[in-house]
Image: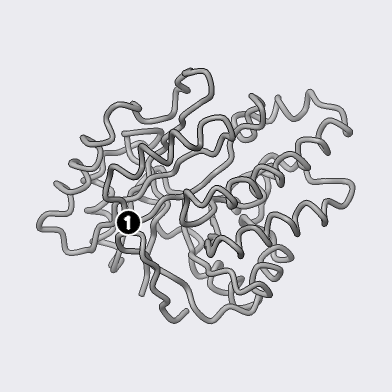
Amino acid sequence: MTTSYHNHSTWSDGTTAISEMVSAAEQIGLLEVGVSDHFVLYPGGEQVGWTMPLDRLGEYLEDIQAAARGAKVTVRAGIEADFFPETVETLRAILAQHPFDYVIGSVHYLDGFPIDEHRRFWDALSVEQREEKWRLYWERIRQLAQSRVYDFVGHLDLPKKFGHRPTISHAEAQTAALDAIAAADMAIEINTAGWSLPAQEAYPALSLLRAARERDIPLLINADAHAPAHLTRHFDRARDLAREAGYDHLVRYERRQRVAVPL
């Protein structure tokens, strides 16, 4: 079963409407396609430019449902919701009001620092400051998992996007994050977008993927597509990576219930 769940439309920072993403999924021959636009409940009420309007979740879901009617591919209603310690309980209450199939948990900000907006933010940091960002990132992932608001983690090890990899070990923080993901019965994804970015590597790295497999953390393969042409980019490569890490099953979601499917 080929699914592609981590995808964005013009409701957030994608380039096309939901209906166009669904049509492209039909043409590709996907069995399930998901729409998971950004929902960023930023502390202090600030609205970032690439989130959907925070007061239009109902309309967003109606748009997904409209695109699903008559479609030849199963359409899943998802959302990619940022984790902030300050707003996670409000987020929990908001999400509980809507019938999502899955909720992706992501960390794009570290106390105001934009992880993946532009490399200039990382270039401006000292080596020590970059290491602190990496440490804090893993702490936020641990907290994200412990909140139990989300179904799977998006693009694990995102801070490497522009090639700024750690120069020291963060094994203890990584282990704590992975243990929290496993304890929360969450999944992770192989996010294939990293192969097309300066990182030149999928998220997460093979070593992290193997550590996740050792903990029996379930897995999805997703493209993080912002345009129809990217719905299944690098999927064959990702399947090989999953097998190399020891996986023989992936998972899919319906109404936030997880089902295993053969890799």
Q: Quadrant of residue 180?
A: bottom right
Q: Is residue 31 above or below residue 124?
A: below
Instruction: Look at label 1 and name its amino acid.
Output: Asp
Residue tagged by mark 1?
101
Q: Position of residue 25 (x, y in %)?
A: 28, 58
At which x and y percent is residue 145?
58, 52
- Please rate how many residues cluster around mark 1, counting C-alpha atoms within 10 Å: few if below 14, some from 14 to 19, many from 20: many
Q: Residue at x 41, y 50 (%)?
A: 103
Horizontal relation, residue 239 to residue 132: left or right: left
| Residue 181 percent across, percent down from the top left | 61, 59
Q: Nearer the viewer, residue 30 or 145?
A: 145
Name the residue at 71% across, 47% down. Answer: 138
Instruction: Assign a secondary structure to mark 1.
Output: loop
Residue 170 location (% of width, % of height): 83, 51
Q: Which quadrant of the view contains residue 208?
A: bottom right
120 is higher (above) or lower (below) than 98: above
Q: Nearer the viewer, residue 135 or 149?
A: 149
Q: Residue at x 68, y 75 (%)?
A: 214
Whether residue 78 sits left or right of residue 85 in the image: it is: left
Quadrant of the image for the N terminus?
Answer: bottom left
